[in-house]
């Protein structure tokens, strides 16, 4: 069922503590941890504890938790002392999504190009 933990989901396993992660912040509804393959000096993933396959699905089903993810991204950016940063939600394989549990990438600590690749 939507929102329930999925046995085959890496990020559900991180939420449950079955896979280790470098956690920087945790709330009742979210976990933030360092990306294992960082693409910037600061690269942190902010995920909802509930399982939804992507950001739009999360926002449609549980909008308050989608807001929690965004607010937490801002809190992490403050803690990391980032004045400028990018929040990315890859959605679909063609856009680079590889883990189908909604997550925000918080990227900062270097210059960013526009348009993104
Ligand atoms: P995406 O490609 O947008 O689905 O993002 C998935 C991200 O999860 C990638 O940036 C991976 O480097 C990252 N990732 C995969 N496994 C782990 C892990 N065990 N701990 C932290 N980050 C991970
Ligand atoms: Zn999941």
Image (tube, helix red, strand yellow):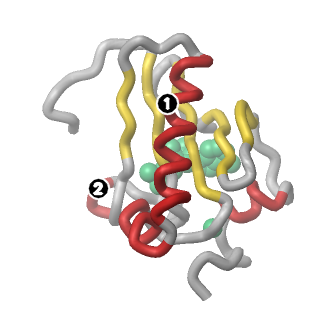
Q: Is residue 3 left or right of residue 25?
A: left
Q: Quadrant of the C terminus?
A: top left
Marks 2 and 1, how far apart at CA: 23 Å
**Residue assigned mark 1:** 74
Q: Is residue 55 left or right of residue 76?
A: left
Question: Is 67 or 111 nearer to us in this picture?
Answer: 67
Q: Position of residue 18 (x, y in %)?
A: 85, 59
Q: Is residue 77 above or below residue 5?
A: above
User: Which of the 4 quarters of the picture holds residue 9?
Assistant: bottom right
Q: Position of residue 61 (x, y in %)?
A: 47, 74
For this orientation, the residue located farthest to the front is 64
Q: Quadrant of the N terminus?
A: bottom right
Q: What residue sits 85% from the left and 55% below the top?
A: 17
Checking the image for residue 31, the label placed there is: none
Q: What residue sits 58% from the left and 16% below the top?
A: 80
**Circle 2 Cα neighbour tier, 10 Å, few/some/many (<14 / 14–19 / ≥20):** few
Checking the image for residue 95, the label placed there is: 2
Circles 2 and 1: CB atoms closer than 8 Å: no
* Mark 2 vs mark 1: in front: 1
**Circle 1 Cα neighbour tier, 10 Å, few/some/many (<14 / 14–19 / ≥20):** some
Q: Secondary structure at mark 2?
A: helix
Ligand 1 closer than 8 Å to label 2 CB: yes
Q: Position of residue 75 (x, y in %)?
A: 57, 28
For this orientation, the residue located farthest to the right is 18
């Amino acid at each position: 069922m939507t929102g329930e933990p999925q046995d085959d989901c890496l990020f559900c396993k991180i939420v449950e503590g079955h896979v280790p992660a470098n956690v920087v912040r945790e709330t009742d509804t979210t976990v933030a941890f360092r990306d294992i393959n960082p693409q910037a000096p600061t690269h942190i993933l902010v995920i909802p504890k509930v399982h939804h396959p992507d950001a739009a699905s999360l926002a449609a089903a549980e909008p308050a938790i989608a807001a929690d993810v965004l607010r937490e991204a801002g809190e992490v950016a403050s803690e990391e002392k980032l004045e400028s940063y990018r929040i990315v939600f890859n959605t679909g394989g063609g856009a680079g999504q590889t883990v189908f549990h909604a997550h925000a990438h918080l990227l900062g600590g270097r210059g960013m190009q526009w348009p993104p690749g």
